[in-house]
């Protein structure tokens, strides 16, 4: 296994609410590609430390990994989701789309500083879990923060390395939300995130949905989701996969038959993302179905994103990264 150099607490943006930082894990290799990890936590909780074994996977995949902080959602004191917030969490807070704006800023900063740290700034994948999966999907299908839509145009400011591209070349989503218009939760986190119910903010619900922005230029995507997910319904990944397929974009979708959110067997047993990969790869291997959308032009040979169709887990992710950003 390659040695990995760790740089913790690098400031990539200085917001009015506080500094935003990232941790960078660099394998001992020449200009490795970069994976940007976006943690989950319902947009309101957790920190960038909630990343699955970054030193291990930086070495095994021969990829640099950057785990990034982003402004968490402000939650009113009387909100039914107030209990999700940890008052000791030092991460700055804001309002959506600050989460998306910050992750894009981190990507631009990472591109601007690639020469200093030695990774390949032209080969970048976004990987996120749950709320982080939503952000990673949105980062993938919206190249520039100013393209998110007029429902948010007054709230978007691009100040960090604005000359750099925020586009990514591949996306990995673990049980990420792709279409807010499918949600029916009038008292939960989504109305807090989008400043109202869908009937009050229909344009926000559409424009904050990654599925709205899928085009033929969207990056190849690897989706993994539990069929028994009670937090983010598996239909979210199905809907996004179908949109990519319709647009002619290559994608792979894994469905884990008996698993809930964060790869637990029951939602009450939900673990941290930090052990998510171990749960995903637990023996015996969980029953799973794999769906591929592989598109080619006339005369071309098919190039599947996970050629060996290994079970969901680190092997599948490595094959996907090898096909997309290597």
Image: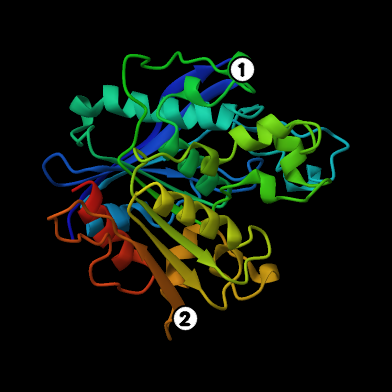
Q: Return the residue at label 1.
A: 155
Q: Residue 306 appears in which quarter of the rendering?
A: bottom left
Question: Horizontal placement of 81 versus 50: left or right?
Answer: right
Side of 321 relative to 83 (left or right) = left
Q: Residue at x 24, y 72 (%)?
A: 308
Q: Residues within 10 Å of mark 2 (few under 14, many from 20)?
A: some
**Mark 1 vs mark 2, CA separation in Å:** 43 Å
Vertical relation: 51 (above or below) 149:
below
Residue furthest to the right: 78
The first of marks 1 and 2 along the sequence is 1
- Between 6 and 38, the one lying in front of the other is 38
Question: Which image quarter holds the N terminus?
Answer: bottom left
- The residue to which callout 2 is attached is 286
Which residue is at the front of the view, 200 or 58?
Answer: 200
Q: Is residue 84 visible?
A: yes
Query: Is disc 1 in contact with disc 2, using a CB cutoff of under 8 Å?
Result: no
Q: Left or right: where does residue 10 sit relative to residue 299?
A: right
Say which residue appears at 23% left-offset and 32% top-offset.
121
Q: Is residue 90 visible?
A: no
Q: Is residue 224 above or below residue 325?
A: below
Report x, y in % for residue 250: 32, 53
Q: x and y percent of residue 58 in the render? A: 27, 52
In what element is the residue under mark 2?
A: loop
């Amino acid at each position: 296994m390659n040695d990995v150099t760790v740089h913790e607490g690098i400031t990539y943006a200085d917001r009015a609410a506080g500094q935003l930082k990232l941790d960078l894990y660099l394998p001992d290799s020449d200009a490795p590609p970069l994976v940007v990890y976006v943690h989950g936590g319902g947009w309101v909780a957790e920190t960038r430390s909630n990343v699955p074994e970054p030193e291990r996977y930086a070495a095994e995949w021969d990829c640099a990994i950057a785990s990034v902080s982003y402004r968490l959602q402000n939650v009113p004191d009387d909100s039914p989701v107030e209990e999700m917030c940890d008052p000791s969490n030092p991460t700055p807070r804001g309002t959506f789309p600050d989460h998306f704006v910050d992750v894009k800023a981190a990507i631009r900063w990472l591109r601007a500083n690639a020469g200093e740290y030695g990774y390949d700034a032209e080969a970048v994948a976004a990987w996120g879990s749950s709320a982080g999966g939503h952000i990673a999907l949105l980062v993938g299908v919206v190249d520039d923060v100013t393209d998110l839509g007029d429902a948010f145009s007054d709230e978007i400011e691009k100040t960090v390395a604005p000359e750099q591209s925020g586009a990514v070349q591949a996306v990995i989503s673990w049980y990420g939300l792709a279409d807010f218009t499918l949600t029916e939760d009038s008292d939960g986190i989504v109305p807090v995130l989008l400043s109202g119910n869908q009937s009050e903010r229909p344009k926000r619900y559409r424009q904050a949905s990654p599925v709205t922005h899928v085009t033929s230029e969207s990056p190849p995507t690897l989706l993994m989701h539990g069929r028994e997910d009670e937090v983010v319904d598996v239909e979210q990944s199905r809907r996004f996969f179908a949109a990519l397929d319709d647009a002619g974009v290559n994608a792979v979708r894994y469905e884990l038959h008996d698993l809930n959110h964060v790869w637990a067997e029951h939602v009450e047993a939900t673990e941290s993302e930090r052990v998510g990969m171990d749960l995903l790869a637990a023996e015996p291997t969980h029953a799973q179905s794999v769906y591929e959308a592989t598109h080619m032009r006339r005369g071309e040979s098919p190039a599947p994103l996970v050629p060996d169709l290994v079970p969901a887990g680190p092997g599948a992710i490595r094959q996907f990264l090898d096909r997309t950003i290597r």
